[in-house]
Every structure is written in C-alpha cells, then in structure tokens.
Image (cartoon, helix red, strand yellow):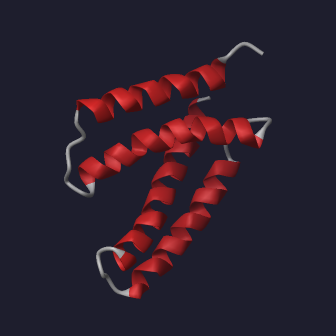
Amino acid sequence: MVKSYFYYVLASFAEIAGCFSFWAWLRLKKSAWVIFPGLVSLVAFAYFLTKVESDFAGRSYAVYGSIYIAASFVWLWLVEAKVPDKWDSIGVGISLLGGAVILYGHR
C-alpha cells in the first residue's frame, strides 16, 4: 500500500501541475508555451495512476480524489504562497478519512 500512496502523490502533483499550466496561460496571461510541459505532466499523471495497486479503476480513482484534495492544498501553500485556513484543513482531513474508508473498508 505504501507504493500505491507514492503513486497517488506523484499522480496528484502531475495532474495539478498540468492543469495549472492551463490556468497560468488562460487566467494569468502567461505564454501559450506553458501548456506544453503541462501536457507532458498530464500524461505522467495518467501513467502514475495506472501504477496503483487496485483491482478496480473506479475505487482507485475515488481514493485518489482524497489524495488530490490534500495535494491541492499543499500546492496552494507552496506554489501559490497562500496558507490554507482551518476549514481547508478540516476538509482535507474529512476527505482523507473518506479515502481511507474506501481503501481499507472490509469487503
């Protein structure tokens, strides 16, 4: 499972970086050239997500969602220099708890 979390984290930052390249181009008025590394990053995102140990894609994507939420706030803090507030932290905790229930729930 540790290996899966490693790939979830890699996938989340690759997806965020890829999407942020479009945000930078369209919202921050950066050069259109910023989307090319973003496209590479989005391909890496898809690749990393296939490396997760899971029998079902849907369940894997659901757990990934909770990791993505946490990674988004790390991105907010480290890249955009905006410290998440207590409500952000509570929401992240709830989403990670939900992901753990999905991942470790008795089946």
Q: Residue 68: percent from the left, percent from the top?
A: 49, 44
- The residue sitting at 48% across, 66% down in the picture is 18
What is the number of callouts on the image? 0
- The residue sitting at 74% across, 35% down in the picture is 54
Q: Nearer the viewer, residue 65 or 39?
A: 65
Quarter of the picture containing the C terminus is top right
Q: Is residue 28 above or below residue 18?
A: below
Q: Is residue 89 above or below residue 25?
A: above
Q: Quadrant of residue 42?
A: bottom right
| Direction from residue 57 to residue 65 in the image, left or right | left
Q: Quadrant of residue 17?
A: bottom left
Residue sitting at the far top: 106
Q: Is residue 90 above or below residue 28?
A: above
Q: Quadrant of residue 106?
A: top right
Q: Residue 60: percent from the left, percent from the top?
A: 68, 38
| Direction from residue 58 to residue 76 in the image, left or right | left
Q: Residue 104: percent from the left, percent from the top?
A: 64, 19
Regarding residue 53, the answer to whether it shows in the image is no
Q: Is residue 1 above or below residue 22?
A: above
Quarter of the picture containing the N terminus is top right
| Direction from residue 14 to residue 76 in the image, left or right | left
Regarding residue 86, the answer to whether it shows in the image is yes
Q: Residue 95: percent from the left, percent from the top?
A: 48, 30
- The residue sitting at 40% across, 26% down in the picture is 93
